[in-house]
Amino acid sequence: MTPPTPASGARPSTRKRVLLLVTLVAVGWLIGAAGSTLTGNTLWYCAIPAAVAVGWLFVADPSRCEGPDRRTD
């Protein structure tokens, strides 16, 4: 039996994943900067790791982290 594939199809290239990471960090930084400017609270910069975590949920493939003996059912 073959291991499950990610829902999005083929695995993204390293270049695409790095671009996605940079984009997510930038989005988180923009949210943090806007929130900090509007409220004066620097906790808005917690949006950076939150944005990266949300993006990870869409591109992660946990089956690639498992050993070969756990990939089959």
Image (cartoon, helix red, strand yellow):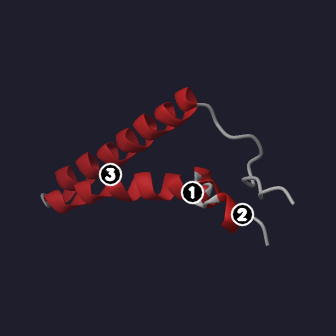
- The label shown at residue 71 is 2
Give the label, 2 or 3, closer to the camera: 2
* Mark found first going from the N terminus, 2 or 3: 3
Query: Secondary structure under badge 1?
Result: helix
Instruction: Compare residues 42 and 52 and report the one nearer the observer.
Output: 52
Q: Residue tagged by mark 3?
A: 48
The image shows residue 1, relative to residue 28, as above or below, that is below
Give the label, 1 or 3, closer to the camera: 1
Q: Residue tagged by mark 1?
A: 65
Q: Amino acid at mark 2?
A: Arg
Instruction: Compare residues 18 and 44 and report the one nearer the observer.
Output: 18
* Mark found first going from the N terminus, 2 or 1: 1
The residue lying furthest to the bottom in this view is 73
Q: Is the residue marked by circle 3 packed among few (<14), some (14-19), or many (20+) residues within 10 Å?
A: some
Q: Amino acid at mark 1?
A: Cys
The residue located at (55%, 59%) in the rendering is 57
Q: Answer with left or right where residue 65 lies relative to residue 38.
A: right
Image position, residue 42 (x, y; %) = 15, 57
- Asked whether disc 2 touches disc 3, contact meaning CB atoms under 8 Å apart, the reply is no
Q: Amino acid at mark 3?
A: Ile
Query: Secondary structure under badge 2?
Result: helix
Query: Where's the N terminus, which quadrant?
Result: bottom right
Query: Secondary structure under badge 3?
Result: helix
* Mark found first going from the N terminus, 1 or 3: 3
Q: CA distance from mark 2 to mark 3?
A: 33 Å
Number of numbered callouts drawn: 3
Q: Answer with left or right where residue 16 lies relative to residue 71.
A: left
Image position, residue 60 (x, y; %) = 58, 54
Q: Answer with left or right where residue 64 lies relative to residue 21.
A: right
Residue 68, by quadrant, is bottom right
Q: CA distance from mark 1 to mark 3?
A: 25 Å
Residue 61, by quadrant, is bottom right
